[in-house]
Image (spheres, rainbow, N blue to C red):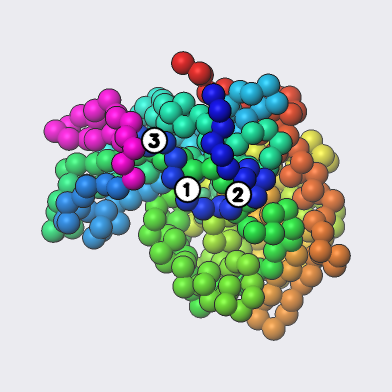
Amino acid sequence: MDKAPLDWPNLEFGYRKTDKNIRFTWKDGVWDKGVLTEDETIPLHMAATCLHYGQECFEGLKVFETKSGDAVVFRIDENAKRFVHSCEKILMEPVSEVTFIDAVFRVVKANRRFVPPHGTGASLYIRPLMLGTGPQVGVKPAGEYMFMVFVTPVGPYFKTGFKPVDLIVEEKVDRAAPLGVGDVKVGGNYAAGLRASMAARAKGYTEVLYLDAKHKRYIDESGPANFYGITKDNQYVTPDSESILPSITNKSIVTLAEEIGLRPQRREVDIEEIFEFKEAGCCGTAAVITPVGSITFRDRKVVYSKDGNAGKYSTELYEKLTAIQVGDAPDDYDWVRRIPEQ
Ligand SMILES: *Cc1c(COP(=O)(O)O)cnc(C)c1O
């Protein structure tokens, strides 16, 4: 099939219309079989719980084309599990993991011409979401839900690509509370952090680094991505916190870090430790691995990248991870699944 006529190497991380999306409805206690549609809009009751009480969650994953032309997806079983967990945490009706995976496969097949060619650095971003669609005015879970998946071809999340970004520690805004919903992928967490992200950008920083809401002392994560630091004695340190989203990318990097001689440690990370790291980075599906060039904390600034380039370990981790994702390196951990043509 002919590819869509796009400038693949220069795609932005943004929405672009594709051929189809898929929707499932939960009504009268059952999920339907799902329908593919060209419609980019959703008919929605004005009293739907997603509009008033935040019954909404989502996922983000990427599909790549291998050298031999297969469409492959990275660790989709993990996204399926996390999606179910997000739905359950805010009392929405989850779809089964099988339905989640099947929906992604169907929508990718229907948009096959939008999977970027191998070697362009671009990918097809998959955005599954669940909405409470049933009307309620009292605070209660909805009686109807919509699960949908749309796709959009994307380039790098941070405009700089694999170049160090500048973070600022935000002490005036909390993204999530320890016993709140920071550990699930719900839209409200992003609304909570928007003002901090925008203020950071206005001051010339790329993103915010959040501290834990309780002690204001330990690193939580960056806006849309987990955080790691590499110590002088080669530990890969990443925060253990109840209020961060358990990143599948981070979990994968922990595995790869061991391969290159780093010792992974998931523990509380005191903000003062940033001054001791030799490298730092952000990681997530969208951010992949984004090296951190500097962190500003109050009136102090630590600079990791003096020449505008990523550090040795972040570079090595990035290369290892992306090679597996696009099928250029052996899939030793069974992370990659081929999306069937039929
Ligand atoms: C999605 C997300 C991440 C990254 O998770 P991945 O599974 O690696 O994509 C990190 N932090 C937040 C807040 C997120 O929403």
In magenta stretch: residue 84: no
Answer few, some or many: residues within 10 Å of disc 1's Cα (few below 14, many 20 plus, some between 14 and 19).
Answer: few
Q: Which residue matches tag 1?
A: 16
Type of the residue with mark 3: Lys
Residue 290 visible within the image: yes
Residue 101 visible within the image: no
Q: Which residue is the extreme one toward the bottom?
A: 299
Type of the residue with mark 2: Leu
> Could you tell me which secondary element the residue under label 2 belongs to?
loop
Q: Which residue matches tag 2?
A: 11
State whether label 1 is within 8 Å of ligand 1. no
Q: Which residue matches tag 3?
A: 20
Q: In this view, does 298 lie above or below 28?
A: below
Gap in angstroms between the C-alphas marked 2 and 3: 19 Å
> Could you tell me which secondary element the residue under label 1 belongs to?
loop
The first of marks 2 and 1 along the sequence is 2
- Residues rendered magenta in the picture: 23-40
